[in-house]
Amino acid sequence: MLTKTYGSAVQGVNATTITIEVVVSQGTNFYVVGLPDNAIKESQQRVEAALKFRGYRMPRTKVVVNMAPADIRKEGSAYDLPIALGILHASQQLTTEQLGEYIIMGELALDGGLRPIRGVLPIAIQARKEGFKGIILPKENAQEAAIVNNLDVIPVETMQEAIDFFEGRQDIQPVQMDTRHVFQHEANRYAADFADVQGQENIKRALEIAAAGGHNVIMIGPPGAGKTMLAKRLPSILPPLNMHEALETTKIHSVAGKLGSNASLLTTRPFRSPHHTISDVALVGGGGNPQPGEISLSHNGVLFLDELPEFKRTVLEVMRQPLEERRVTISRAKVSIDFPANFMLIASMNPCPCGYYNHPEKECVCGPGVVQRYLNKVSGPLLDRIDLHVEVTPVTFDQMTETRPAERSENIQQRVEKARQVQAARFAEFPEIHSNAMMPSQMVKDICQIDPAGRTLLKTAMERLGLSARAYDRILKVARTIADLAATDAIGIDHLAEAIQYRSLDREGWAG
């Protein structure tokens, strides 16, 4: 007898429906075909133990499980439940006509219990797209799947519950979620706030400009000056996620297994801060079955690289292309997968190995040439892609003990949103461009026009600082953002001057 159940395979951030065909016939042995990995081949032991524990029998004849399409590699233990139900139906221990109406996923414990799986959101989206009535999956994953409306999400804790549901002995109510209510109630809630930061007004101003235009930032200063504290508060002044961004971000975290149990829609912008020992594959993504890396997990949010020169050179260099293209392509012999990577890069570093070069009070003990060698660990091409270079100085005692409250993130966010609205209107005809930082070079010439006085100022700065053509574009983009914050159509000479001063690491002899 031939039985068909349906599962799903996640590739990149999208899912493909897998047909699981089970045949029980004369002969011996258990076969799984259709490019399964070892975890799927081992399902025989889990399925057999679970069936016996729940009082069912494993057929002692020939059992063939085919996973189609056979040219797609299937990975993981999430196919245990559909294989078990298929075997029960094919051996006539389960009688139901509804198996084909549902996507079924779940890893079996030896006692027939179900363990959570990952990648549930793209699986649910694909199930609705292909017209399935619903999805049957472990209870811990139900909230995540319920983000997708017009799909019955049936949560089960054991294999027996799934069997009872199909045979009509147990009525399991689909999990319902008002996604928009959850989104509106939970959106834009951050634990960290700029009100906690005393002083550092110039750094707050630079981060406000960065948030308003989607620009990358590097902060350079001595230990304890507040670089990490400021970076962690950047997501709180970015515009709130819209529903499309929230779904896109949740999909990536779901595929990577970062949502945890009973999680649902992500409503705040991600903030990722990988350690400097990270490998290049862990940063950009990859592996045998390509998984998203840190740059994709920070999509629509912030990637913070603390102590930038301590990262391996190869790790920093692989970021150059994703910074420009806002996506990363992982290519393998049989598959090529795109992961989105539209993130803001915030980096921080000490000015020298001892940390006290240019410090107003403490003396630097680094020898001649050591400071420049330390700065040279960060390549010129990478620095070119960072729009704002900000020098962070230590907070004075008077600033630390200031009783007057600092400006709240909420107020800064309102100014950032107004500037982003101006940009949304400006780029309304270009769906791929959302902020000034994303403008291509040709568009910069049209949109970031400056008057003769501004051209003279910029020419002088370019010659004295030895700036590259890319740095020229970056200055114009930042000046455009400063003008947007000031609600002016034209880029003034004061906007240009402020943008130029954010190229401090381009100055010749900065560390000389």
Image (cartoon, rainbow, N blue to C red):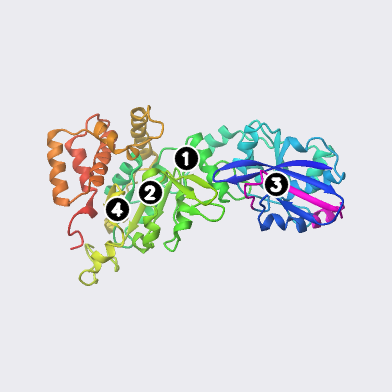
Disc marking residue 188: 1
Q: Secondary structure at mark 1?
A: loop
Viewer-side label of 2, 3:
3
Q: Is residue 54 magenta?
A: yes
- In the picture, measured across the screen, residue 440 lies left or right of residue 46, that is left
Q: How many neighbours does mark 4 have within 10 angstroms: few (below 14), some (14-19), or many (20 or more)?
A: few
Extent of the magenta region? 48-75
Dot 3 amino acid type: Met
Q: Work out which quarter of the rendered image holds the N terminus and state it.
A: top right
Q: Work out which quarter of the rendered image holds the C terminus and state it.
A: bottom left
Residue 157 in view: no
Closer to the camera, 375 or 103?
Answer: 103
Q: How many neighbours does mark 1 have within 10 angstroms: few (below 14), some (14-19), or many (20 or more)?
A: some
Residue placed under numbered mark 4 in the picture: 381
Q: Position of residue 326 (x, y in %)?
A: 41, 43
Separation of residues labelled 3 and 1 (CA atoms):
43 Å
Q: Earlier in the sequence, mark 4 or mark 3?
A: 3
Separation of residues labelled 2 and 3 (CA atoms):
37 Å
Residue placed under numbered mark 2 in the picture: 321
Q: Position of residue 416 (x, y in %)?
A: 35, 37
Q: Earlier in the sequence, mark 3 or mark 1?
A: 3
Q: Earlier in the sequence, mark 2 or mark 3?
A: 3
Residue 93 in view: yes
Dot 4 amino acid type: Pro
Separation of residues labelled 4 and 3 (CA atoms):
47 Å
Whether label 4 touches label 3, CB < 8 Å: no
Residue placed under numbered mark 3 in the picture: 67
Q: Quadrant of residue 482?
A: top left
